[in-house]
Amino acid sequence: MFLGEHQHTLDAKGRLSLPAKFRSQMAGSYVVVKGIEKCLYVFSPAEFEAFLAQLMERGDFGKDFRQVRRFFTAGAKEDDLDSAGRISIPANLREYAKLERDVTVIGNGDRIEIWDSSAWADYNGEAEGRIEEVTSSLAELGIL
């Protein structure tokens, strides 16, 4: 399980050193994809397969399902951690998430998320301001 928030820096080649605890859970390989809200998701290959299996259950007959599946798979990159425990983020994904230098790496249960640090600060500040309202709404639906 991935947990916590970590400040890191992308190098000039678009490589990012993952926190040691996260590296050990990746078992040497990873899949990086576009995430929702202009961040990137990083999965272990097994977790990405499980994620993709959920998307594929619906088949190709619904336009929305095709669109969501394409969103997560078209720019995806599967690779191995390098000898220094870094992941390489391709230019198209760095551009999508507006990653330049300072990034925030967060654990989100079954995946890692990579955010531009200023975008994360904005998002997190807004989320913290709404958390009571959101949890109340979910509780009314019986989810929490």
Image (tube, rainbow, N blue to C red):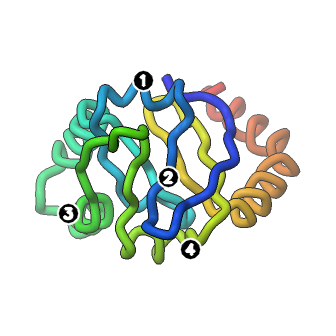
Instruction: Give the label on residue 16, or none.
Output: 2
Distance between mark 3 and mark 4 Cα atoms = 30 Å
Percent across and percent down for residue 75 are 28, 67
Distance between mark 3 and mark 1 Cα atoms = 38 Å
Distance between mark 2 and mark 4 Cα atoms = 14 Å
Judging depth in this view, the residue of 104 and 51 nearest the camera is: 104
CB-based contact (under 8 Å), mark 3 and mark 1: no
Q: Earlier in the sequence, mark 2 or mark 4?
A: 2
Farthest-out residue, front: 83
Judging depth in this view, the residue of 74 and 79 nearest the camera is: 79
Distance between mark 2 and mark 1 Cα atoms = 15 Å
Judged left or right of residue 138, residue 71 is left
Comparing marks 2 and 4, which lies closer to the viewer? Answer: 2
Residue at screen point 78% across, 58% down:
121
Judged left or right of residue 32, residue 10 is right
Comparing marks 3 and 4, which lies closer to the viewer? Answer: 4
Q: Amino acid at mark 3?
A: Gly
Comparing marks 4 and 1, which lies closer to the viewer? Answer: 1
CB-based contact (under 8 Å), mark 2 and mark 1: no
Residue at screen point 40% across, 24% down:
25
Judged left or right of residue 5, residue 121 is right
Instruction: Give the label on residue 98, or none.
Output: 4
Q: Earlier in the sequence, mark 4 or mark 1?
A: 1
Question: Residue tagged by mark 1?
Answer: 24
Comparing marks 3 and 1, which lies closer to the viewer? Answer: 1
In the figure, residue 68 lies in which quadrant? bottom left
Distance between mark 4 and mark 1 Cα atoms = 27 Å
Question: Residue tagged by mark 3?
Answer: 62
**56 vs 100: above or below:** above
Instruction: Say few, some or many: other residues with alpha carbon within 10 Å of mark 4 (under 14 / 14 to 19 / 20 or more).
Output: some
Q: Amino acid at mark 1?
A: Ser
User: Which structural element holds mark 2?
Assistant: strand
